[in-house]
Image (cartoon, helix red, strand yellow):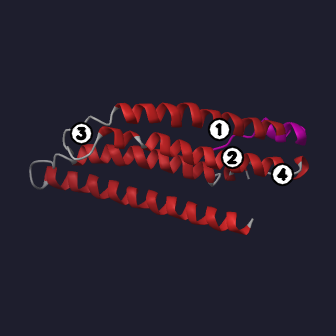
């Protein structure tokens, strides 16, 4: 169990560093675009496209990280009114739905989209394939799937009367 916690902690830390680096890159890209547009009179051609790419990656990897850290938004108004066993069952059902969504939409659908776009180049970044941009979708889906499996195991192991909130926003 300690090995799993250590590996998970390292994995989450790596995702956090990746997201922070991408946010920093996004910020610098936008600042460079503004500087070149207003100070040099002509915006650097690549800045808009690179900013969009980084926003996609930050959004998908960041969403998976937020889900894994239970930092996503949660609404528990009706859930807290349920019997503990019903809450546990509902929590497990939610994780199964997240797993199905991650596999069908993000991993399978995202992979198909990314592979279908691999031959296309980006206009202002010709060295980068459009498919690589879309690889953020299945990658985010894999991360969400792993975190959902972990959540499901944790919920299943926890007695219903000791099961707490499923997000940090719920308490």
CA distance separating discs 3 and 4: 47 Å
Q: Which residues are magenta?
A: 73-88
CA distance separating discs 4 and 2: 12 Å
Q: Which residue is mark 3?
A: 122
Tell me the tag on residue 157.
4
Tell me the tag on residue 149.
2
Q: Which residue is mark 1?
A: 99
Q: Which residue is at the front of the view, 58 or 100?
A: 100
The residue that appears at 70% across and 51% down in the rendered structure is 150
Give yes or no for contact between labels 1 and 3 (Cβ–Cβ under 8 Å): no
Q: Earlier in the sequence, mark 2 or mark 3?
A: 3
Give yes or no for contact between labels 2 and 3 (Cβ–Cβ under 8 Å): no
Instruction: Relative to 103, say whether 53 is above or below.
Output: below
Residue 72 visible in the current orientation:
no
Instruction: Relative to 143, say whether 18 is above or below.
Output: below
Give yes or no for contact between labels 4 and 2 (Cβ–Cβ under 8 Å): no
The residue that appears at 77% across and 40% down in the rendered structure is 91
Residue 142 visible in the current orientation:
yes
CA distance separating discs 1 and 3: 32 Å
Q: Which residue is at the front of the view, 122 or 79?
A: 122
Q: Residue 50, how many percent across, how many down?
A: 28, 47
Q: Earlier in the sequence, mark 1 or mark 3?
A: 1
């Amino acid at each position: 169990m300690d090995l799993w916690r250590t590996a998970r902690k390292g994995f989450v830390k790596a995702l956090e560093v990746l997201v922070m680096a991408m946010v920093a890159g996004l910020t610098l890209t936008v600042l460079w675009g503004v500087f070149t547009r207003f100070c040099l009179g002509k915006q650097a051609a690549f800045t808009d496209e690179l900013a969009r790419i980084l926003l996609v990656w930050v959004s998908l990897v960041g969403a998976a990280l937020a889900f894994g850290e239970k930092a996503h938004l949660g609404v528990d108004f009706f859930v807290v009114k349920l019997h503990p066993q019903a809450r546990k069952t509902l929590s497990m059902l939610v994780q199964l739905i997240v797993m199905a969504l991650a596999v069908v939409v993000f991993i399978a659908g995202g992979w198909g989209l990314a592979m279908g776009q691999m031959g296309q180049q980006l206009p202002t970044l010709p060295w980068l394939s459009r498919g690589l941009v879309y690889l953020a979708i299945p990658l985010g889906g894999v991360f969400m799937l792993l975190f959902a499996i972990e959540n499901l195991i944790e919920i299943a192991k926890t007695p219903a009367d000791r099961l707490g909130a499923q997000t940090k926003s719920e308490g």
